[in-house]
Amino acid sequence: MVVHNDVPPLPERDSASPPLDAETVEALFRNHAQALRWFIRGIVRDPETAEDVLQTTFTRLIEHGGPDQTDPASRKSWLFQVAHHEAIAQKRKGRLRERANRDARLVRAADSGNQDTAEDHLQRAETIARVRQAVEALPPAQRDVVLRRLAGRETFAAIAQADGLPLGTVLTRMRLALGRLRSLLDSHRDPSP
């Protein structure tokens, strides 16, 4: 599992600053909700999850008051930053659920007496474990691109936009990661035919 420790904690509400009023929150929602929705969908690839993340983003705004209340540009930036972190957190949860479901399906398939033997399932499980281990061995920036592109099915352009990077940088990270994965997995390959 990839854990990103670079996510800044949400600021505590300053007891001296008043909470945002409903009118301000409604105006922020009217002005930024659609752009946030598109941004979030580019990350999570699921409209329902995107709506959940959008709601969570505005809940955080209400709970924490957001940034300096006199600067509308900083509010927009803050909303996109919170939306990005929430969307990535949802993706991580989704990947964990998918992994658990895949592992459960493997176990059920092994128990159901399918045409594949238990040895076939064991070999597949070992291959999956080797691939996961190789991905975890990648440098964090490369690992992030690989997981977001392959497991999360994000486009390279969406990854570049979300991280504020040039598209070429994201593509280079993926190319380097694939080369390194190939090398790591070839070194573990069974030499027998």
Image: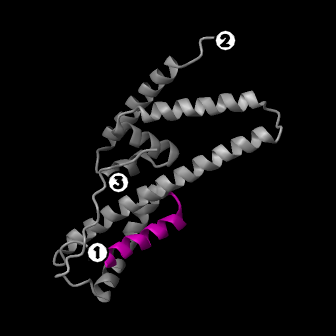
Three-letter amino acid code of the residue under disc 2:
Pro
Residue corresponding to mark 2:
193
Q: Nearer the viewer, residue 42 or 105?
A: 105
- Residue at position x 46%, y 27% in the image: 181
- Residue 15 horizontal side relative to residue 55, left or right: left
- Residue at position x 82%, y 42% in the image: 112
What sort of colour scheme is used for the picture?
one colour
Q: Earlier in the sequence, mark 2 or mark 3?
A: 3
Q: Where residue 18 appears, x then y in whole percent?
A: 21, 85
Residue corresponding to mark 3:
162
The picture quadrant where one finds residue 53 is: bottom left
Q: Is residue 37 magenta?
A: no
Q: Which residues are magenta?
A: 45-64
Label 2 crowd (10 A; few <14 / some 14-19 / many >=20): few
**SS for tag 3?**
helix
Q: Earlier in the sequence, mark 1 or mark 2?
A: 1
Three-letter amino acid code of the residue under disc 1:
His
Callout in the foreground (1, 3): 1
Whether 152 is drawn above or below 181: the answer is: below
- Residue at position x 29%, y 46% in the image: 165
Residue corresponding to mark 1:
64
